[in-house]
Image: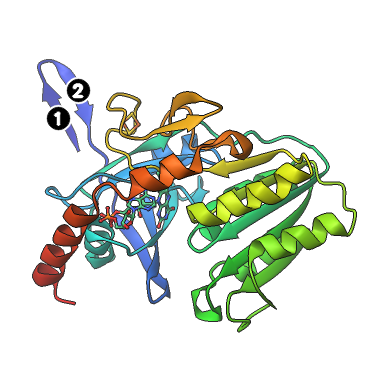
Amino acid sequence: MVGCVCGIIIIKFMNKILKKEKLNENVSRITVDAPHIARAAKPGQFVVIVPTENAERIPLTIADTDTSKGTISIIFQIVGATTKVLDSLKEGVEIAHLLGPLGTPSHVEKLGTVVIIGGGVGIAEIYPMVKAMKKVGNEVITIIGARCKDLLIYEKELRTQSTELRVTTDDGSCGRKGFVSDELKDIIAAGKKISLVVAVGPVPMMRVCCDVTREHNIKTVVSLNPLMLDATGMCGICRVTVGGKIKFGCVDGPEFDGHEVDFKELTDRLKGYKDVEKRAMDHVCRLLGG
Ligand code: FAD
Ligand code: FES
């Protein structure tokens, strides 16, 4: 759609949901028609989505792109009002607003052995990084973990792209019983020379992985998930402290040196709007049912 405001030509892309799949009870994947974003996106970048005109803006990682079809894939966990609204949209529906690609892309280079760790919905977020790191010639050991087998996603896709895939579940229903950090400890204990660890997932998981690698002086990158609003470096809501300095997750990140991140501050700031978030979710559930 093309419009004209004060002499400025505005092109609005339709961002139609071409495909929608349930990966598990709480996680969905949508494939969206977004040729300009598909062409420009790099691993580690994200989009801001406003699912319907009155919904909030939320950041979601670009999990995959297909430049020949002009599409991007987004994988999201339903945790609150906006992800619930997004999940209610059916194939063929247009997303109200889609902005991206945003954020500083992942640093991809040939380093040797790279361990890439994904926990929960973070598993989907590591997929572009695994592909890119393998493509430039690294040995990529991927570790994925979830609470149980039913919550594991992307196992087949990551097995294809990685040199080696290791799986953990909290309850032992798939792979090793335990945490991703247990597998990481084993790889280090076996004497493997690791050039880089990348950890993406819940804050406690990323913090524990950093504690493990700090002892062994292994460089570790984490992808932070602070609350975001404009996602272009203007509002400051996404501020995080890294190496004693204030950084903006949306433009300086979302990836940072994990050994320098103030995880306690990040955790506290993520809890800041719990009451409002709960009220919004109750409201949306009443409107949509469920
Ligand atoms: P809310 O009502 O806003 O929140 C519900 C619960 O989720 C609360 O407990 C709240 O503390 C927590 N929450 C809210 N925002 C975040 C956040 N940014 N990170 C962690 N927890 C949050 N999620 C995905 O499922 N897939 C992705 O690919 C993905 N990529 C992201 C990339 C970036 C750069 C960032 C910053 C976040 C990403 N997230 C991703 C998290 C996602 O943005 C939030 O889950 C979403 O904003 C929640 O919105 P809501 O209205 O549904 O829930
Ligand atoms: Fe506003 Fe980052 S979200 S500055």
Q: Which residue is mark 2?
A: 9
| Disc 1/disc 2 C-alpha distance (Å) | 6 Å
| Residue 25, label in figure | none
Measured as percent of width and height from the top left, residue 97 is found at 24, 43
Q: Nearer the viewer, residue 120 or 158?
A: 120
Cβ atoms at labels 1 and 2 below 8 Å apart = yes
| Callout 2: SS | strand
From this view, report whether residue 66 is shown above or below residue 91.
above
Task: Give the residue at x 62% y 64%.
Answer: 144
**Relative horizontal placement of residue 68, taking residue 273 as reference (left or right):** right
Of all residues, the one furthest to the right in this rendering is 191
Q: Nearer the viewer, residue 35 or 221?
A: 221
Q: Is residue 162 among what the camera can see?
A: no
Confirm or reject: label 2 Cβ below 8 Å from ligand 2: no
From this view, report whether residue 56 is shown above or below residue 247.
below
Q: Which residue is mark 1?
A: 3
Measured as percent of width and height from the top left, residue 17 is found at 31, 58
Task: Give the residue at x 10% y 71%.
Answer: 286
- Quadrant into which the C terminus falls: bottom left
From this view, report whether residue 254 is shown above or below residue 151.
above
